[in-house]
Image (cartoon, grey):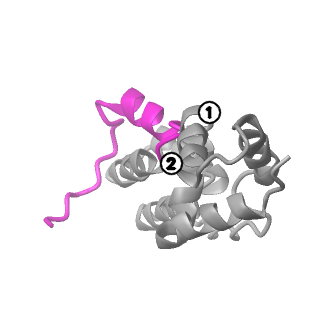
Amino acid sequence: MNHKEVKSELPPNFKELKKSADRTSNWRERLDAVEELGQWKNDQTIKLLKRIMAADTVYKVQEAAFRQLKKLGEDVQMPPQKKSGAIKDVNKILLRIKKSLPEGHTFKEFEEKLKKMRLDVYDTYEGEKGADFDKWLQETWISLPAR
C-alpha cells in the first residue's frame, strides 16, 4: 500500500464521509470513513474523527479514529472500552424481539427479526464481538425468558 501524504484541505467527498461516519447500521462503512478521513488534516476532519473516537458504539471504529488522530499529530487519549456493553439495555431490546415472535420460533427467525427491526443493534454487536458474535447472540437468545 503506498502511503499517501496528508492533505490540509477538506476532502471533496467530506459530506459523504460524514454520512458514512454516522451510519449506525454499518460499522464497516464507518471504519472505512475513518481510514479515509485520516488522509486529511483540517479542523472539520479532526473534529469528526474526535467525535467518532469518543462516541462510536464499536470499539474497533473508536480505535481506528484514535490511530488516525495520533497519525495527524493530535494529542488524544484512547477512550476506555465500555464495560456495560455497546448499547444500553440491549437485553431489553432483544427480549422485546423474542417476545414478539411465536412460541417455538427458531434462532434464525429471531436473528432475521432482529436484523429487520434493529439493524443498528445487530451491526454494532457484530462489530464488537467479531468471531464470537453468533455464539453470543445464540447464547443471549437462549438465556432470555420465552414469555
The residue type indicated by label 2 comes to Ile
In the image, residue 79 sits, relative to residue 92, either above or below, namely below
Q: Amino acid at mark 1?
A: Met
Residues 25 and 143: in front is 143
Question: What residue is disc 2 on?
Answer: 46
* Mark 1, other Cα within 10 Å: few <14 / some 14–19 / many ≥20: few
Q: How many marks?
A: 2
Label the magenta part by its dominant secondary structure: loop
Check the image and name the residue furthest to the top.
Answer: 15
> Label 1 belongs to which residue?
117
Where does the magenta region start and end? 1-26
Magenta residue check for 15: yes
Q: Position of residue 100 (x, y in %)?
A: 74, 35
Query: In the figure, 103 relative to 19: above or below?
Result: below
The answer to whether residue 88 is seen in the rendering is no
> What x and y, as percent, mark residue 56?
61, 51
Q: CA distance from mark 1 to mark 2?
A: 33 Å
Q: Pick the quarter of the image with the N terminus.
A: bottom left
57 displayed left or right of 82: left
The residue at the point 23 percent across, 57 percent down is: 5
- Mark 2 element type: helix
- Above or below, comparing residue 21 to residue 74 in the picture: above
Residue at 36%, 50% (x, y): give it: 32
Q: Secondary structure at mark 1?
A: helix
Identify the residue shown where x is 32% and y is 36%.
11
* N-terminal label among 1 and 2: 2
Residues 118 and 79: in front is: 118
- The picture places residue 146, in percent across and down from the top left corner, at 81, 51
